[in-house]
């Protein structure tokens, strides 16, 4: 069942947001000038919600999504300004991860700020929660977040999975990177052990093993412990696969990606992304490459796992009818900017930006007469050194002189609904455009 | 423009003409194995499909990936020859009726007449002028406009090529024809001397359409023409296609997986599953009263923007079986929610079921088939065999499959299973022009669906 339930935003003492993007601006240099791919994008993702990021090709939605994990090609890209802050969660102290009332039976709570231990200080803006600035995090720290606290599902599982590794090998990496202590624990090695066995297995469990390590580990005194560790790893991988309703995980482990169907590969991707129980999942068009019948099943799966674990999801898509079904809130992007953001039902019932309206009317439905689809005229503008105007100028049916000289800011027009268009600007009523009037 | 008028006067255009009649088309690809590359089986991509495309109408062809819809599109446009059956071009309504009687009639006189008819109308038997006539009247637009436009040619060469090949125009006349074609698809004279990479996806698809229009065809096969485009651009292209059809009386075969596009564009709909037609009929009728469980599943899985918020998306269980060994009876019975014992349960269903269950499949050593419904499954141990036999008698397997089982006997390490033998499910009429290949009567299918 895919329904639109409004979940409570988590805990009483938690910040309502799990991540927030402020004034994110990404430029790419080109021969003709600077391409403003993402231009002062701001939004926040609330704890436990699904936020949809919708827009057409080249609107900057994927660039925004990738910036969370420092996956952008910088250089050549330029991070002009902006921050992406993230509040990681940690295991709930009251119940040790089994689930209790204090953590809403998810077993996780926002991690406390390391400098004030939750009391609230300047560093955490008084919220008491640990705050991480993702864009400028050093490589070793972002590696610990990537795949563990924030995970990503890519559009094409055929390309995102390594064709030379078995499914088991690829999923093992997640556990070896982020669950080293647990694996060592399974092999009977505690955190205090400093012996040769502990060091060798420690290197194996954190993917730093060399050929001499492998040789020593294959000899009898260490072989038993190594096998214990590898068995634990295999069981972890199988459990992660079983979570995504793969019927026979132990058979899948030894297969290569090309042996699986598209739907199965996407399940493996989801298993990999959710293996470490992330706080935030970034799904970049996860079902675009799949058939509709499989798509429904994959979405059901994401929704179900999300409900059980209270994971927040940033769902990037171009499919409006899908977004309407699965997202709590929606942000519509056009040419590098967020033009409208708000609760899903508000946006779809009362689309208030001319672009959102155009987009909704362009989708063929049973009711539209043939040849009468309301296509948005023209094409997406090139984002090379854009003028200080509204980006929708030239395609907008309501544009006025004001739109060509000034860029409208995102402003709230109703509760949980913000739009960047002069149409809703009461003060500048004289030369502001209106929905009643059409130019041309 | 004179040349164009000549062409239209040569072809007598009548509204009830059948532009293209597809009769029992099969496309089987051989599977080769071993040192001598001997043929060990066939992938039945298209396996006996029949339908008509009438002048000026749009036929939508939908199905999941791998159902054979693109292969059929290629057979229809003559890009690949069918391995069985035929595609007939340019028949009048009376001739199609005659063709159907001839195909059904096995007598020598009928075969002789059929052979004569095939020489004139069957697209893979055409020669000379008749072949040229077919080729210029059936054009194709492909999904990937990057791959289907030569990156080293200018727009004038791409769009002007068909005109030059068919000696329709040259020199200045050619340029003018190309300009008029570009204007019809919303481009202009200033685009003549540009390369494909200088255009956006939507514009490139417009160039493809202009090229397809150049020889004023009767039929255009559109293979997922808007799948790679954004919705706002898709709307532009769909509007353009509609206008061109209205003005020129074009027929379209619209191959796509997008149901909302097909619902919007197609007059008639053909749903394909695993190389066969599951359902065909008037688009609105099919969407309002789908008769085949597969069509219903497709419609249920696709969210429509206008649906009320409470409607849930329904996934279809399982995956498409191997087209090299398509299921018996109704090909959809392995995934069907309302399957009956008569739907063609067979030995392969037991094997498929074993594959997805733990432990038992590893013990399976081989299958000795008498036919598709009767076989002995050899296991490495008698315990495994007994285990399977008892499971087959329990509730763990679908009730319909259990009822179709006629015999389960264990002898040593082998289990002999025999299912009821049923013929392949044929298309039956459900209303005027509405056909579905399903055993279930519409009156009691609607309640048990989904």
Image (cartoon, rainbow, N blue to C red):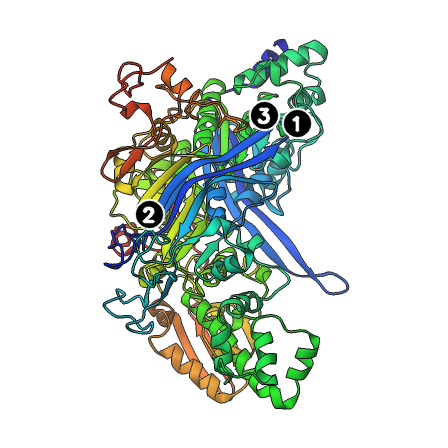
Q: Could you say where residue B174 lies in the image, as x and y percent from the top left?
A: 67, 14
Secondary structure beneath label 2: loop
Secondary structure beneath label 1: helix
Mark number, residue B130: 1
Q: Quadrant of residue A204?
A: bottom right
Q: Could you say where residue B62 lies in the image, as x and y percent from the top left?
A: 46, 43
CA gap between label 1 and label 2 equals 56 Å
Q: Could you say where residue A122 lies in the image, as x and y percent from the top left?
A: 35, 52
Q: Nearer the viewer, residue A13 or B353?
A: A13
Same chain, marks 1 and 2? no
> Is B295 situated above or below B392?
above
Q: Residues within 10 Å of mark 1 (few under 14, many from 20)?
A: some
Q: Chain of mark 2?
A: A
Which of the marked residues, 3 or 1, is nearer the chain's N terminus?
Answer: 1
Residue B250 in view in this figure: yes
> Is B352 situated above or below B413?
above
Q: Quadrant of residue B394?
A: bottom left
Tag 2–tag 3 contact (CB < 8 Å): no
Q: Chain of mark 1?
A: B
Q: Nearer the viewer, residue A307 or A420?
A: A420
Q: Chain of mark 3?
A: B
Q: Nearer the viewer, residue B277 or A391?
A: A391
Residue that numbered label 3 is attached to: B207
Tag 3–tag 1 contact (CB < 8 Å): no
Q: Residue furthest right?
A: B36
Which residue corresponds to the image point at 62% horizontal and 27% vertical from the top-left? A32
Same chain, marks 2 and 3? no
Secondary structure beneath label 3: helix
Q: Nearer the viewer, residue A120 or B383?
A: A120
Q: Could you say where residue B41 lies in the image, as x and y percent from the top left?
A: 63, 60
Q: Residues within 10 Å of mark 2 (few under 14, many from 20)?
A: many
Residue that numbered label 2 is attached to: A327
């Amino acid at each position: 069942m895919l329904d639109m339930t409004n979940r409570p935003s988590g805990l009483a003492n938690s910040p309502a947001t799990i991540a927030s993007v402020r004034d994110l601006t990404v430029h790419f240099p080109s021969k003709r000038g600077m391409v403003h791919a993402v231009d002062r994008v701001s939004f926040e993702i609330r704890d436990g919600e699904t936020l949809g990021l919708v827009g057409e090709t080249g609107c900057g939605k994927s660039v925004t999504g990738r910036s969370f994990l420092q996956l952008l090609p910088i250089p050549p890209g330029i991070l002009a300004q902006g921050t992406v802050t993230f509040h990681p969660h940690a295991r709930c102290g009251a119940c040790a991860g089994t689930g209790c009332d204090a953590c809403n039976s998810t077993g996780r709570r926002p991690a406390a700020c390391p400098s004030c231990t939750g009391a609230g200080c300047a560093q955490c803006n008084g919220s008491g929660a640990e705050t991480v600035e993702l864009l400028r995090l050093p490589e070793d720290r972002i590696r610990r977040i990537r795949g563990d606290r924030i995970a990503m599902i890519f559009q094409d599982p055929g390309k995102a999975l390594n064709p030379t590794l078995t499914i088991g090998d690829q999923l093992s990496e997640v556990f070896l990177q982020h669950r080293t202590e647990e694996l060592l624990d399974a092999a009977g090695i505690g955190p205090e052990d400093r012996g040769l066995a502990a060091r060798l297995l420690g290197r194996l469990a954190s993917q730093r093993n060399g050929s001499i390590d492998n040789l020593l580990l294959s000899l009898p005194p260490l072989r038993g412990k190594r096998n214990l560790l590898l068995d634990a790893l295999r069981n972890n991988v199988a459990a992660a696969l079983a979570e995504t309703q793969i019927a026979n995980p132990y058979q899948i482990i030894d297969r290569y990606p090309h042996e699986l169907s598209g739907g199965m590969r996407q399940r493996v991707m989801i298993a990999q992304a959710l293996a470490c129980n992330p706080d935030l999942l970034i799904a970049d068009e996860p079902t675009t490459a799949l058939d509709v019948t499989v798509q429904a099943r994959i979405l059901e799966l994401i929704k179900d796992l999300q409900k059980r674990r209270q994971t927040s999801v940033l769902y990037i898509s171009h499919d409006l009818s899908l977004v309407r079904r699965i997202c709590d809130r929606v942000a519509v992007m056009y040419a590098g900017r967020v033009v409208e953001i708000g609760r899903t039902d508000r946006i779809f019932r009362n689309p208030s930006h001319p672009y959102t309206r155009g987009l909704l009317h362009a989708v063929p439905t049973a009711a539209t007469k043939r040849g009468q689809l309301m296509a948005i005229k023209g094409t997406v503008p090139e984002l090379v050194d854009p003028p200080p105007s509204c980006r929708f100028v030239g395609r907008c049916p309501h544009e006025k002189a004001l739109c060509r000289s000034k860029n409208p800011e995102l402003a709230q027009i109703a509760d949980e609904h913000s739009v960047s268009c002069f149409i809703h600007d009461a003060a500048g009523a004289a030369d502001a455009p209106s929905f009643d009037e059409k130019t041309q | 423009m004179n040349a164009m008028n000549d062409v239209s006067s040569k072809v007598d255009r009548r509204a009830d003409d059948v532009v293209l009649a597809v009769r029992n088309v099969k496309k089987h690809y051989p599977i080769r194995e071993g040192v001598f590359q001997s043929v060990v089986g066939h992938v039945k991509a298209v396996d006996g499909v029949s339908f008509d495309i009438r002048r000026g109408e749009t036929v939508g062809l939908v199905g999941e990936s791998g159902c054979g819809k693109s292969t059929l599109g290629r057979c229809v446009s003559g890009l690949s020859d069918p391995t069985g059956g035929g595609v007939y071009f340019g028949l009048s309504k009376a001739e199609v009726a005659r063709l159907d009687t001839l195909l059904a009639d096995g007598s020598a006189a009928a075969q002789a007449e059929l052979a004569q008819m095939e020489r004139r109308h069957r697209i893979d038997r055409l020669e000379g002028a008749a072949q040229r006539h077919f080729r210029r009247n059936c054009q194709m637009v492909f999904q990937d406009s990057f791959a289907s436009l030569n990156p080293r040619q200018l727009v004038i060469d791409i769009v002007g090529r068909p005109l030059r090949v068919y000696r329709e125009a040259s020199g200045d006349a050619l340029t003018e024809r190309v300009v008029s074609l570009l204007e019809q698809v919303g481009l202009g004279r200033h685009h003549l001397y540009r390369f494909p990479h200088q255009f956006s996806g939507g514009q490139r698809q417009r160039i493809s359409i202009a090229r397809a229009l150049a020889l004023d065809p009767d039929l255009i096969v559109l293979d997922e023409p808007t799948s790679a485009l954004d919705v706002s651009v898709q709307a532009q292209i769909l509007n353009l296609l509609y206008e061109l059809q209205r003005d020129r009386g074009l027929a379209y075969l619209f191959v796509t997986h997008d149901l909302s596009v097909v619902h919007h564009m197609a007059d008639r709909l053909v749903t394909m599953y695993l190389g066969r037609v599951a359902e065909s009929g008037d688009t609105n009728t099919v969407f309002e009263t789908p008769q085949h469980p597969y069509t219903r599943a497709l419609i249920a899985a696709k969210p429509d923007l206008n649906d009320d918020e409470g409607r849930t998306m329904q996934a279809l269980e399982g995956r498409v079986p191997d087209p090299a060994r398509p299921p018996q009876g109704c090909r959809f019975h392995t995934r069907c929610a309302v399957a009956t014992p008569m739907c063609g349960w067979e030995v392969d269903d037991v094997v498929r079921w074993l594959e997805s269950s733990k432990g038992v499949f590893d013990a399976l050593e081989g299958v000795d088939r008498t036919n598709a419904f009767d076989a002995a499954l050899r296991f490495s141990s008698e315990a495994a065999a007994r285990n399977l036999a008892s499971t087959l008698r329990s509730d763990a397997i679908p009730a319909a499959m259990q009822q179709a089982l006629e015999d389960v006997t264990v002898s040593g390490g082998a289990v002999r299973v025999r299912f009821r033998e049923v013929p392949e499910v044929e298309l039956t009429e459900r209303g005027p022009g509405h056909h579905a290949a399903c055993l279930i009567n519409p009156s009691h299918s609607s309640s048990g669906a989904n």
